[in-house]
Image (cartoon, helix red, strand yellow):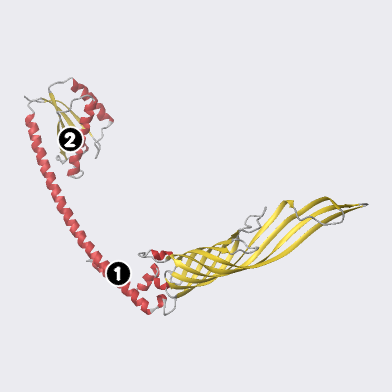
Amino acid sequence: MKRYLTIIMLALSSGLFADVVAQERGNSAYRTSTWSLYAEGGATMVHGLGMSSVDAPPGMNIFPEIGAGVSFNIRPWIRLGLNYDFSKYAREQRFSEFQPLGVPTGDGTLSEQYGGLAYSKMWTHYHAADATVEFNLMEFWRNREDKRFNLYAGAGFGWLFAKGNTYDISMGHERWSEPYKETINTWLDAVNTRHKYDVGYVPMLLSAEFDVSPVVTVGLQGNYKRLLKCDNAPKGIGTASVVLRLNILGSKSGYKSTGRKLRESELALAAMTVAGAAAKADCEASGKAKDEALASAKTENAALKSRVEALEKENAGLKARRTNEVLQDLTVQFSNDSFKLSAAAKTDLEAFAGRLKSTEGVELVVVGEASATGSSGHNLRLSELRIETVLDYLRKQGVDCSRALRQPLGDSGKDTSDAARRATILVVSRGE
């Protein structure tokens, strides 16, 4: 009765607060004909640049990046994006030896030359804007219940605007010789060269996003821009960034829509109805399983009782076969719920086996018992294992146990003390 009341309360709560449930698990309505604004920040680096750094400080190849954009969700599996980002890249060369320059010109014959390029630094700022088509790969998982996590992959086309400077510092001296004249030219040259280029590129992105709430989404994004061939431009620019997205959900779409609320409530109520039916079926199945388990236990109890009666009859028959008194006996004690021999028991069995080898015309009777601390079926099996353990050890000592009689009594004595955990070996004379 309590279970049915709980199910009814859950169904009512789900119908009243379907919108809360939708927020917790995500809803495809958030990404159907809705807009979102985002801002992102991270780090960027370029490759394929004609100039490489030499003896530059750490971090010269990685620079901060910021960006923003707007997205339009057509359906949960596809959206369009307009994206902008800004960053820079740089290279620095600190030469330990002068780098050769062009052949100098002067009057006379060049008899000595020393020097060249000593230092160079280039940096470039760029603005990039592109349009992309992005697909939600998680929508291939049709039966997922939690739709807060989404993985977008997309591509498009954009344009990059870049400009920057290159500083070169060179120095040296030259000696020029003429008849009756010699000229020495010592120089230091610093040149600032500006460069600028605009080039198209193909953006490729992968964005993992999580809906913290219907309005706020956070994510991690990787972006690669493959630039078209252009002088002074690198081959590609890679970016890794953190994204914060604001979902704009109006009254005609998204979770604020009255129609969507009603449909979500109906779906939630239908789901709880199905859950209630499943719970009821589970209760009925559980009751049936308990009845079957009880019947099985009764059948097993009857079988054990029958086996005990058979063992008692066998015991009576064995007693009838004893025509003489017991010649020898040995009691082997075992630990609780164990059929392994202790070191002391092994010593006693070895001495007992030595005495048996010199005795003829006798039979072995091994009685196994267990304390009444567990189930009768388990204790009966335990007493059988204790008998076989004793006989196996006697065989290893050279005793013929082929005609040994076994009497597993289990816990038929109803004794719960440690003394009941034993196997008793009886040596009797053979009957005629």
Name the residue at 62% across, 57% down: 59
Amino acid at dot 1 = Ala
- Image quarter in which the C terminus is found: top left
Mark earlier in primary sequence (2, 1): 1
Question: Camera-side residue: 427 or 52?
Answer: 52
Q: Can the viewer see residue 241?
A: yes
Q: Residue 244 in the image: state x and y as whole percent.
A: 50, 68
Viewed as shown, does residue 231 lie left or right of 190? Answer: left
Element class at badge 2: strand
Which residue is found at the position 17% from the left and 31% from the top? 424
Which mark is drawn over residue 271? 1
The quarter of the picture where residue 121 lies is bottom right
- Residue 221 bears which disc, if any? none
Return the x and y of residue 203 as percentages of the image width and height: 54, 65
Position of the N terminus by quadrant: bottom left
Per the model, the C-alpha gap separating discs 2 and 1 is 59 Å
- The location of residue 74, given as percent across then percent down, is 44, 73
User: Front-most of 184 and 249?
Assistant: 184
Label 2 crowd bin: few (<14), some (14–19), many (20+), radius 10 Å? many
Q: Is residue 227 above or below residue 308?
A: below
Indicate the position of residue 42 as horizontal and vertical percent values: 56, 63
Q: Residue furthest right?
A: 180
Check disc 2 and report the residue beneath it.
Answer: 368
Of the pair 16 and 136, the residue shown nearer to us: 136
- Please tell me in which quadrant of the rendered image residue 391 appears: top left
Q: Can you tell which of label 2 and label 1 is closer to the viewer?
A: 1
